[in-house]
Amino acid sequence: MISYEPPSSTAPMFSPLPPPVPWPAPVRASDADRERTVALLHDHCMAGRLTLQELEARCEEAWRAQFIDGLWGAMRELPVPMPQPGPVRQDGAGAASASLALGVVGTCVLLFSFGLLFVLSLPATVGAWVAGRSARRHGSASGPYRGLALAGEVLGVVGTILGCLALTGCALIVSSF
């Protein structure tokens, strides 16, 4: 028969709750943080969410706040807009590399097929021309990528001219029949 023995007072007790996690250290508010908070409070007052007396009291609270938590206290019961993401920095590697790859593929297809696959090579070389030109014009290709963009653009121009010549040759052959 199985008997049950209550745990002794020296045995460790199981706790269903995890141990408390200490809060992170408070973060000090900067002058720029306070200015942003006061600007948001003014926006809320203009939207009719705060009276002038509430605005004045909350602005004083924001200017006296030493920590970020104090700024959140000044914004209590008010909607806070989501921060807008900053501009995405493009280094031009994508457009420049795409330009060079399209130029190489389009020109190789045209040359190895002796111009017969101009239908496939023309879109690739025109794409290389456009991608290389836009990468160079908009300044997104800088440093070593500028050379890639230029090489892709040149291959695109050469491939487009050769593809148009192949198209013209095929058109002349077809029209002579």
Image: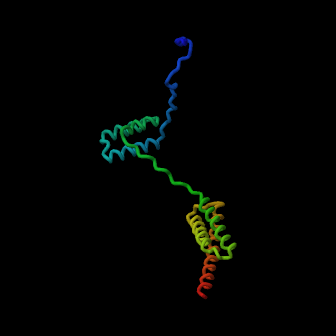
- Residue 72 sits above or below residue 163 on the image: above
Residue located 34% across and 40% down the image: 56
Residue toward you, 128 or 24: 128
Query: Which of the 4 image quarters holds residue 115?
Result: bottom right
How many labels, in total? 0
What is the quadrant of the N terminus in the image? Answer: top right
Residue at (30% x, 39% y) in the render: 53
Task: Pick whichever, 29 or 91, lies toward us.
Answer: 91
x 51%, y 21%: residue: 15
**Percent coordinates x, y for residue 70 in the rendering:** 43, 35
Residue 154 x/y as whole percent: 64, 71
Q: Residue furthest front?
A: 1
Q: Nearer the viewer, residue 80 or 171?
A: 171
Corner quadrant of residue 109: bottom right
Outermost residue on the bottom side: it is 176
Looking at the picture, does residue 157 appear above or below residue 144?
A: below
Quadrant for the C terminus in the image: bottom right
Q: Position of residue 26 (x, y in %)?
A: 49, 33
The colour style of the image is rainbow
Q: Is residue 80 left or right of residue 157?
A: left
Q: Position of residue 130 (x, y in %)?
A: 57, 68
Q: Is residue 73 above or below residue 126?
A: above
For residue 107, side relative to residue 25 (left or right): right
* Residue located farthest toward the right when viewing the structure as drawn: 112
The residue drawn where x is 39% and y is 39% is 75
